Image: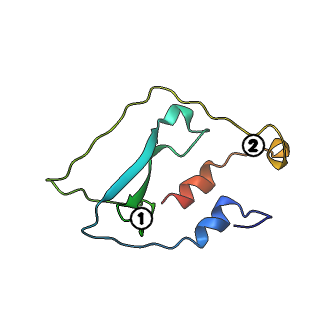
Amino acid sequence: QEKPYPNMTVAAAGEKVHTYANVTGTVVGFYTPVFIQDLNTVGYHLHFLSDDHTMGGHILDMTVPANSSVEYDITPYYTVALPTSGAFTGTNLTANMSGAVAAVEQ
């Protein structure tokens, strides 16, 4: 994306959807509980990267075969470091984006 950066709804309208089958790789993501919905999308937010690094992206749906190996980590806290200079410092982050997020994450 290039400046001026599009909002989430505009950016998602150009999102490409791919279907992969019989691919091994890594899924990375996090779960956001409803009580902190203003910080992120509620629920699971997952991304995939194939072992050969040729396929990947935001996961909309997936099925994990029964014989697969799955590991997970429960991280009770994390720190987000926000920029302290540049355009970000003037960005208005008070808008209620819940409707836009819900539309995009469908």
What SS does tag 1 mark?
loop
Q: Which residue is nearer to you in this view: 80 or 102? A: 80
Which residue type does callout 1 highlight? His
State the image quarter where residue 6 is shown.
Answer: bottom right
What SS does tag 2 mark?
loop
Q: For the residue carrying disc 1, how many other residues have a C-alpha within 10 Å: few (<14), some (14-19), or many (20+)?
A: few
Residue sitting at x 15%, y 53%: 66
Which residue type does callout 2 highlight? Leu
Q: Residue furthest front?
A: 52
Q: Residue furthest top?
A: 76
Q: Are marks 1 and 2 in contact (CB under 8 Å)?
A: no
Q: Which mark is residue 53?
A: 1
Q: Which mark is residue 15?
A: none
**Residue 80 percent coordinates (x, y):** 62, 34
**Residue 24 percent coordinates (x, y):** 28, 61
Q: Quadrant of the N terminus?
A: bottom right
Q: Residue furthest left?
A: 67
> Which residue was labeled with disc 2?
93
Left or right of 19 in this view: 12: right
**Residue 96 percent coordinates (x, y):** 69, 45
Image: 31 above or below 1: above
